[in-house]
Image (cartoon, helix red, strand yellow):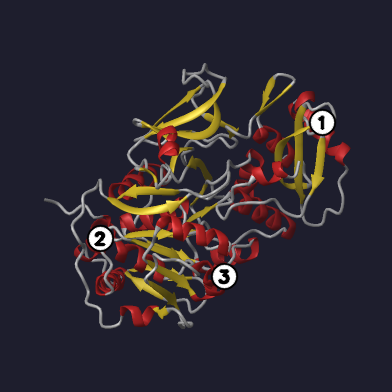
């Protein structure tokens, strides 16, 4: 029987194919360490041995609150080698959320980057499931250092597993509330590499990838690990906070050929570059965007300034990566493109009937990377995973050319004068304004308790003031009289998840 443990394909195979000395990961910050495929196999095997030495049994959860640093791939793949379940967590959460997730997952081992220890420590009080806490770096009181944990451990071979066996969990980003544990199987990692990675991105061995999106969530996990490791490429990782300046420096100095980011950063980078008036220095051949729909205006400005196309698509934690996308030879900014080869999508109404062309419907998808379900959320699993189809919660319309245009989340849509309004359509019109950097739109009740659009906007750097009336008039001319925002609040920043998704529920709470 063939061993279908994902670590065999993504790690062990490269040694047999002669890539043991090739760099798999290199850090762009800190000590700027590098890790070859051979060293990754050895260290991941030693991590597997350390887990067994400390009594970790098959399918026990290994929670990871780990920055993008070399220990992340070692712990992730080493846990798979041992048959344990790695659970990467968002590194930007509060102690109370960590406490809830650690209790929910019942992880027996927790791995924490030293920089995050003070935030995480209060979340550990009263946890009866954790047996060991491992800190990457100097070990504080109550924890064990990473080096001590793996010392004297034997290097173990990869355990046998089937493609349908549980491999890892990811917690949803919480753009609409409490994060949920999403359970994925071994075969899903290769499925995303065989579909989006190979057939849309065209990843190849000579590529160097840099993903601003962190490895703890689905988009970043595919960008930084599954895709480059599927072909033996190299990935640049960055543990710091991505800003337009820091990311531009990495593109200039590390010279990646594939760049993966989110719309917020693309908007910020292109604005900064336009302000500088200088041509950017880089070696990027292709970019990807996900996490939130990319505004048409941002995509067009980016390609004009950076001379590198952005392949914008939509994915989800439940589907592991992008399943609907533009392609390098068929990009229409302002749309999410077409189904990625290997996936099917359809639009349905509230009765699950197919909608007509041009009408808005909920997007459903089926394909090889769908999650097994949510942990401890049976009712939610039944409503999201329906046979072969997965409900995305996203509203789309399909154009006559077969492309899909994002209209917003199912719970973000609202009616004005009996007509559906897409918050994203109004947001697209707002960011077309030359002085607006970002925008978010939610529903708000007026003095007659009638629902109307309310806008929150972030102005571009150097713009001191912009009148609400000017903004309203601009939107009226762009998309129509009844869709314009009745209220406009200028804010310093929009609330977002670490994946770049705007948390509109927080904006609605303030309305």
First in residue order: circle 2 vs circle 1: 2
Please state which of residues 180 and 210 is positioned toward the viewer in this rendering: 180
Q: Please say whether residue 215 is visible from this viewpoint.
A: no
| Figure label count | 3
Residue under label 3: 119
In x, y percent, where is residue 263? 60, 48
Q: Where 350 sits versus 41, above or below?
A: above
Q: Quadrant of the C terminus?
A: top right
The disc placed on residue 279 is none
Residue 179 appearing in the image: yes
Residue situated in front as seen by the camera: 373 or 130: 130
The first of marks 3 and 2 along the sequence is 2
**Where's residue 336, x and y in %?**
53, 36
The residue beneath circle 2 is: 58
Q: CA distance from mark 3 to mark 2?
A: 29 Å
Residue 197 position, x and y percent, is 38, 47
With respect to residue 468, does 279 lie above or below?
A: below
Q: Secondary structure at mark 1?
A: loop
Pointer 1 with pointer 3, Cβ within 8 A: no
**Mark 1 lies on residue:** 446
């Amino acid at each position: 029987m063939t061993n279908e443990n994902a670590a065999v394909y993504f790690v062990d195979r490269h040694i047999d194919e002669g890539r043991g000395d090739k760099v798999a990961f290199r850090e762009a910050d800190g000590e700027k360490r590098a890790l070859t495929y051979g060293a990754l196999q050895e260290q991941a095997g030693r991590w597997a041995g350390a887990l067994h030495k400390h009594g970790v049994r098959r399918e026990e959860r290994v929670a990871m609150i780990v920055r993008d640093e070399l220990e992340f791939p070692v712990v992730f793949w080493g846990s798979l080698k041992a048959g344990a379940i790695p659970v990467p967590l968002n590194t930007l959460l509060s102690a109370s959320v960590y406490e809830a997730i650690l209790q929910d997952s019942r992880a027996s081992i927790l791995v924490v980057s030293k920089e995050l220890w003070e935030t995480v420590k209060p979340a550990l009080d009263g946890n009866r499931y954790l047996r060991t806490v491992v800190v990457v770096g100097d070990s504080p009181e109550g924890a064990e250092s990473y080096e001590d944990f793996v010392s004297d451990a034997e290097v173990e071979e990869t355990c046998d597993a089937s493609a349908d066996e549980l491999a890892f969990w990811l917690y949803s980003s919480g753009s609409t509330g409490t994060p949920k544990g999403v359970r994925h199987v071994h075969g899903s990692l290769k499925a995303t590499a065989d579909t989006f990675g190979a057939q849309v991105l065209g990843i190849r061995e000579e590529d160097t990838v840099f993903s601003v999106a962190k490895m703890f969530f689905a988009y970043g996990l595919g960008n930084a690990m599954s895709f480059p490791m599927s072909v033996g490429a190299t990935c640049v990782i960055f543990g710091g906070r991505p800003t337009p300046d820091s990311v531009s420096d990495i593109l200039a100095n590390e010279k990646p050929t594939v760049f993966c980011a989110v719309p917020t950063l693309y908007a910020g980078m292109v604005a900064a570059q336009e302000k500088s008036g200088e041509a950017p220095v880089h070696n990027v051949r292709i970019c990807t965007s996900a996490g939130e729909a990319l505004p048409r205006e941002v995509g067009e400005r980016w390609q004009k300034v950076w001379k590198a196309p952005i392949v914008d698509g939509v994915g989800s934690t439940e589907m592991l990566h992008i399943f609907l996308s533009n392609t390098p030879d068929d990009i229409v900014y302002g749309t999410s493109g077409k189904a990625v080869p290997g996936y099917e999508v359809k639009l349905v109404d509230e009765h699950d009937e197919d909608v007509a062309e041009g009408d808005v419907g909920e997007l459903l998808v089926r394909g090889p990377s769908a999650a097994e379900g949510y942990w401890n959320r049976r009712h939610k699993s039944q409503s999201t995973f329906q046979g072969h189809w997965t409900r995305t919660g996203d509203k789309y319309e399909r154009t006559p050319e077969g492309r899909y245009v994002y209209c917003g989340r199912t719970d973000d849509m609202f009616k004005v004068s009996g007509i559906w309004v897409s918050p994203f359509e109004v947001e697209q019109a707002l960011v077309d304004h030359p002085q607006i950097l970002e925008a978010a739109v939610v529903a708000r009740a007026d003095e007659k308790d009638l629902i109307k659009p309310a806008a929150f906007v972030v102005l571009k750097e150097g713009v001191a003031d912009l009148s609400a009336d000017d903004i309203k008039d601009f939107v009226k001319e762009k998309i129509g009289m009844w869709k314009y925002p009745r209220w406009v609040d200028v804010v310093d920043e929009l609330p977002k998840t670490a994946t770049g998704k705007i948390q509109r529920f927080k904006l609605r709470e303030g309305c």
